[in-house]
Amino acid sequence: MSNIVLTPIGDTEQVTGTVGKSVFRVVFTENGEPLDPTSVVLCDAGATYGVKRLDLGAVVVAANTPMVCTEPGRYQYELTDPAPGLWYEAVVTAMIRGQVYRVTLRKQGGGGNLRELSAALDPLIVPYLPGAPLAVVHQVERRILRDWCRQGRAWKQVVNAVTVAGQAEYELSLPAGTHVLDFVEARIDDAAWTVLKLAPDQETVEFSYAPAESDLVIEVTVILGALMSCEFVPEWIVERYGDGLAAGVLAYMHGMAGMPWYRPNSVGIEMDQFRSCIGEARVERLTSRGPAVTYLIGGMAI
């Protein structure tokens, strides 16, 4: 008896080294061996879309768009994301010996490492927010990350450049969606160099005197902040501070009066956990915890 199986591979995943692109993959097998259908397209049963956004329902890939065969039994389609972190529904339709086979994929699309942040935080958050749209949850996750960066100042990043003889000023190539909060140090060829005052949000660094040689390695260490458009988040932030970040998201969401997930009795406890997370980040930088911060949530000062 023939056993034909359609297997989605990761549903959607970011194309390696490419920010802003997602790839849909599916594998066809028969009795455990690769199988190539007569045709493989992205198309729902009503022939209205191939891939659509779940937040707006907008069609991003037309019905009957062919998928590409990358090797026997393996097919994929690469999509340029209209925006980072969107959720999609894709329907793969295959024709095999005159019979239609169909599988539906629902997953989050590309968007740099921020998608990894959501993937790590969502299991700590979504079960406690019945009925909350993922688009709203992810927006609040970005806001919490932004607040954590600004208050905790723990995102230390080394930005590299190469010297040009006689040139004192250099552009800082920051990760997408970030900005400078603080300057830590600058080194050229592993030796400390003094710089003119580096202001917050400045994207260039100017040394007090220009290097005499070219092709030396410049290392400028800064403290980064996240913007709402941030697309890059180091994994260590989630590993070290994920529980605190999740608590901050839950505090904001549970403070939304009138929503099905409104839980005012939880807000104070969760916000305390988030504040502790910020305090830990500041202490680990050997800085003061700073003044207490008041958040306005659902009309309540927390």
Image (cartoon, helix red, strand yellow):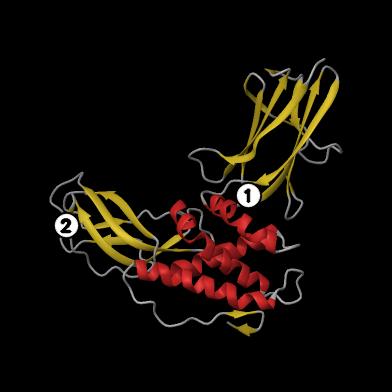
15 to 194, vertically: above or below:
above
Image quarter of residue 220: bottom left
Residue 2 position within the rendered picture, expressed as x and y whole percent measured from the top left: 80, 16
Query: Which element type, helix, strand or loop, lies under badge 2?
Result: loop
> Which residue matches tag 1?
82
Query: Label 2 crowding class (10 Å Cα cut-off): few <14, some 14-19, many 20+?
Result: some
Viewer-proximal residue among 172 and 183: 183
> Which residue matches tag 2?
210
Q: Is residue 224 left or right of residue 78?
A: left
Marks 2,1: beta carbons within 8 A: no
Q: Is residue 84 visible?
A: no
Rendered image: mark on residue 97:
none
**Mark 2 vs mark 1, CA separation in Å:** 42 Å
- Residue placed at 45% from the left, 66% from the top? 149
Q: Is residue 195 left or right of residue 73?
A: left
* Circle 1: residue type: Pro
- Residue placed at 68% from the left, 58% from the top? 134
- Residue placed at 67% from the left, 78% from the top? 265
Q: Is residue 219 left or right of residue 151?
A: left
Q: Is residue 179 visible?
A: yes
